Image: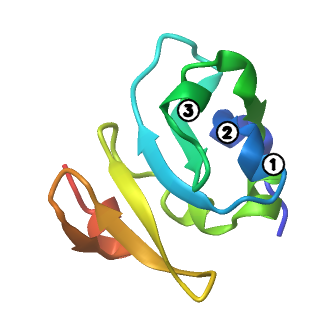
Amino acid sequence: MKISNDEYGGFVVSKNIVSGVPIRYSFREKGSIQQLNGWNLYSINDNEEYINNSSNFVILSAESIYKLSPVILEIFDAPYGTDLCWLYQEDVHIGFYDLVEDREITIDEILKRD
């Protein structure tokens, strides 16, 4: 798959994810930095102390994030305010839990919100 990084902007990603730890939590917020797309990704191992240290995060391109977790590009167009917990079964990603709506949610439902 050919990915144009310019179309997506940068993702803020925990270094734990880059090291191979699964994503646990993702949220999208409108930011003040135009080059970022608003997506923030935390790993299963990230605790409050870890996330409070900005040096524990890197900015990744769409091509790089696709190599780590292709599904993030499937939900890329979710609106700002999207707040998801990633669900796993036997270490395999099986879906999402919407923390705002307090329920499991499909990709189609994530993308159809206003």
Q: Position of residue 16 (x, y in %)?
A: 74, 46
> Label 1: how many residues lie within 10 Å, few (<14), some (14-19) or many (20+)?
some
Q: Is residue 23 above or below residue 57?
A: below
Q: Is residue 102 above or below residue 62?
A: below
Residue that numbered label 2 is attached to? 13
Apparent side of residue 94 relative to residue 63 in the rendered image (left or right)? left
Apparent side of residue 76 relative to residue 23 in the rendered image (left or right)? left
Q: Quadrant of residue 34?
A: top right
Asked if one can make out residue 62 in the rendered structure from this viewpoint, the answer is no
> Label 2: how many residues lie within 10 Å, few (<14), some (14-19) or many (20+)?
many
* Amino acid type, label 3: Asn
Q: Position of residue 8 (x, y in %)?
A: 65, 41
Residue that numbered label 3 is attached to? 37
Residue nearer the viewer, 24 or 1: 24
Q: Secondary structure at mark 3?
A: strand
Residue shown at 78%/40% (left/top)? 61
Q: Earlier in the sequence, mark 3 or mark 1?
A: 1
Q: Position of residue 71 (x, y in %)?
A: 60, 68
Q: Nearer the viewer, mark 2 or mark 3?
A: 2
Q: Are marks 2 and 1 in contact (CB under 8 Å)?
A: yes
Q: Is residue 8 above or below residue 110?
A: above
* Amino acid type, label 2: Val
Asked if one can make out residue 21 in the rendered structure from this viewpoint, the answer is yes
Q: Earlier in the sequence, mark 2 or mark 3?
A: 2
The span from disc 3 to disc 1 (Cα, nearest Å) is 18 Å
Q: Earlier in the sequence, mark 2 or mark 1?
A: 2
Residue that numbered label 1 is attached to? 18
Q: Secondary structure at mark 1?
A: helix
Residue nearer the viewer, 65 or 17: 17
Q: Secondary structure at mark 2?
A: strand
